Amino acid sequence: MPIGNVTQQGNAIFVFDERGRKILEKHFGFGRGDGLKGYTGSTFSVKWGATLYTFDEKGRQISARIN
């Protein structure tokens, strides 16, 4: 199911489909500069510490890159 929107509220990331239905919720311990960095129709990226994580629409981690 394609990603329509991704938002962040506090330490939670919410992923919505194209119809606005929540399909995923992930929680992180965010520090300064951490959080949601962007999304596409099939992935979203979150900076956590020194690492940029990319997840698919089901919340599975598909990559991690140390900055």
Image (tube, rainbow, N blue to C red):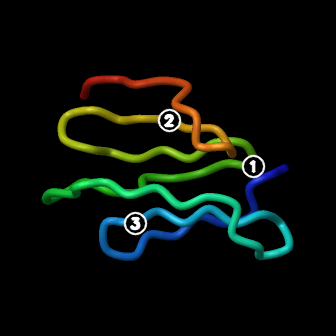
Q: CA distance from mark 2 to mark 1?
A: 13 Å
- Relative horizontal placement of residue 47, taking residue 17 as reference (left or right): left
Give the SS element for disc 1. loop
Looking at the image, which residue sits at the far left? Answer: 32
Q: Which of the 4 image quarters holds residue 21?
A: bottom right
**Amino acid type for the residue under numbered disc 1:** Gly
Q: CA distance from mark 1 to mark 3?
A: 19 Å
User: Where residue 36 appears, x then y in whole percent?
Assistant: 41, 57
In the depicted view, which residue is nearer to us: 43 or 12? 12
| Sequence-earlier tag: 2 or 1 | 1
Location of the C terminus by quadrant is top left
User: Where residue 41 appears, x then y in whole percent?
Assistant: 75, 49
User: What residue is shown with label 2?
Assistant: 54
| Sequence-earlier tag: 1 or 3 | 3
Q: Which of the 4 image quarters holds residue 4?
A: bottom right
Q: Residues within 10 Å of mark 1 (few under 14, many from 20)?
A: some
**Amino acid type for the residue under numbered disc 2:** Thr
- Relative horizontal placement of residue 50, taking residue 45 as reference (left or right): left
User: Where residue 52 appears, x then y in whole percent?
Assistant: 35, 35
Up/down of 2 relative to 9, above or below = above
User: What residue is shown with label 1?
Assistant: 41
